[in-house]
Amino acid sequence: MPGIQIHDKFFVPFINADTINKRVRALAGKINSEYAGKNPLLIGILNGSFIFAADLFRELMIEAEISFIKLVSYKGTSTTGHVISAIGLEENLHGRHIIIVEDIIDTGKTLSTFLPEIYLRNPASVKIATFLSKPAALQFDVKADFNAFEIEDKFVVGYGLDYDGLGRNLPDLYILES
Ligand code: 5GP
Ligand code: MG
């Protein structure tokens, strides 16, 4: 696999599609056994998670539902600070087993700000499935329950993740050349 250029930056191959697909299947296997008979509701966070969420969902052999939301962040009042709110969360989460599906946990800020919104709706349980995480970059108290790959603290594109809009359709994951 050759390196690629997106906008002004160069990226080199990092994790190939085969390896990704095997790991996603393994995660789905865990969910299959843990959630049989529970009809979990997967909530994918757009845009980055759409490919991971679709691949993961296709591998679920149990009764399961999926929905997608978009998070918008804006400046709240001086007491609330930075606010992240969900668009498109119409499902009734009360008593449901929720699996949040993210592309990547970087600092953990997005999820740690958003998760209270989920808990307010009284779900039966909440777990997090993320395609990637960067343990060295973590600054907030969030932990993935299902994590396909832990990676170093460098910028990556592909498999749903973009650099300024481009690169989401790459089947392999690429990392910024250093
Ligand atoms: P956090 O709130 O955990 O710091 O950031 C999570 C979000 O930052 C991800 O959902 C993603 O949109 C973006 N992000 C963090 N690291 C990367 C990366 O290496 N590549 C891309 N494309 N997006 C990233
Ligand atoms: Mg994202």
Image (cartoon, rainbow, N blue to C red):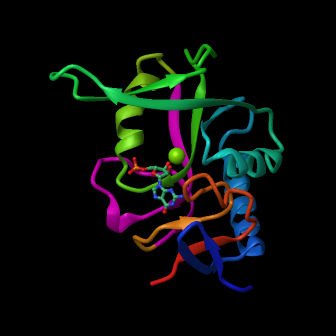
Is residue 29 found left or right of 175 in the rendered image? right
* 11 vs 18, nearest the viewer: 11
Q: Quadrant for residue 154, please give it.
A: bottom left
At 77% from the left edge and 52% from the top edge, which residue is drawn? 55
Judged from this view, the residue extending furthest toward the left is 78
- Image mark count: 0
Is 133 in the magenta?
yes
Residue 48 in picture, x, y percent from top left: 60, 48
Lateral position of residue 141 relative to residue 9, left or right:
left
106 in magenta: no
The image shows residue 177 at horizontal and vertical percentages of 50, 82
On the image, the x and y values in percent for residue 8 come to 53, 70
Region of the chain picked out in magenta, as a range: 124-151
Splitting the image into 4 quarters, where does residue 76 fall?
A: top left
- Residue 171, relative to residue 77: is it above or below? below
Which quadrant of the rendered structure holds the C terminus? Answer: bottom left
Q: Give the residue drawn at x 63%, y 47%.
A: 49
Q: Nearer the viewer, residue 67 or 170?
A: 170
